[in-house]
Image (tube, rainbow, N blue to C red):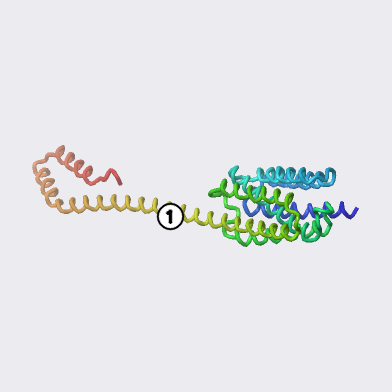
Amino acid sequence: MFALITTLSTNLLRTYIIYRFMRLFFWTDIEEKKKERACYVLFFVLTAGVHLIFCSPGMSVITNIVLIFLITVCYEGALKKKIFVTLLVYGTNMGCDLVAVHLLTDYSITGKVGECAAYITVLLLLICDVISEKILIKNKGEDKTPHGMILAVISALCLAELLIVEQELKNRILLVLFGCCVLAVVLLIFYLYDVLISAYKKLEEQSLMEKQMLIYSHQLDVLMQSEEKVKALRHDMKNHLGELALMAGNQNNEEIRKYIQDMGEYMQNQSE
């Protein structure tokens, strides 16, 4: 009975922490709230059910990865970003689990995980989430993820290495140290993600500024052309007035109208 309570309570906490992780990478509209909640409920029920019924680490790994990816589908974003987030979040979870399990028990001999280890896993996962939130505080929920596929590959390699080392390495101390190293790499990936987004935003701002400078330059050219025409018109104004006075004296109304029309066309700047 106590094992059941431990599984359900820790899985509920883990579901909430995964929700917090998703908030670091994605935003959601109010209209998508029901869909979002349904995915988290499904995650909680299926992950807990698979763990309790089958007690198979392999099935738990596959179920968690598939369901975390399903959660990312609720949010707007590129596919490569969703793959990256899925692998990074589950890799963080596995690293915490590796440290907690082998820190307290010799899992290779007993094959059993104590209830205390499950709670320590959740605690470590929450600590990683808080640190990650501090790292991404300026770029929280950014839509664009530069080099998302490269980050996804790095996360996949970390996850694969975790799975291989946990099966092959039998030394508890080395396993705990390796788990700590993986968590450090995960936090570095968060930092790299933040740096890339900041650099990408600066490039976008620089590009926008260059476009604005081109627009201002064009406007200045247009104004200078107009000013030159106005100066030329002022310079010749006496001649124009003389011509108009002469035409008026001869009562050539049609020529006066045409002359005024030509003056108006000259004063107009087609590019303005």
Residue at 59% across, 44% down: 80
Give residue 168's position: percent from left, percent from top: 73, 50
> On the picture, is 130 further left or further right than 201?
right
> On the picture, is 214 further left or further right than 73?
left
Give residue 61's position: percent from left, percent from top: 74, 46
Viewer-nearest residue: 258 or 184: 184
> On the picture, is 49 further left or further right than 81?
right
Q: Secondary structure at mark 1?
A: helix
Task: Kindly give the residue lying farthest to the top in the view shown.
Answer: 254
- Residue 122 visible to the viewer: no
Q: Amino acid at mark 1?
A: Gln
Residue at 80% across, 61% down: 104
Give residue 112's position: percent from left, percent from top: 84, 53
> On the picture, is 167 further left or further right than 188?
right
Residue 172, quarter of the rendered image: bottom right
Density class for disc 1 (Cα within 10 Å; few <14, some 14-19, many ≥20) is few
> What residue is pinned by disc 1?
206
Viewer-nearest residue: 41 or 35: 41
Residue 45, quarter of the rendered image: top right
- Residue 88 visible to the viewer: yes
Q: How many marks?
A: 1
Residue at 86% across, 54% down: 5
Give residue 98's position: percent from left, percent from top: 74, 55
Viewer-nearest residue: 250 or 161: 161
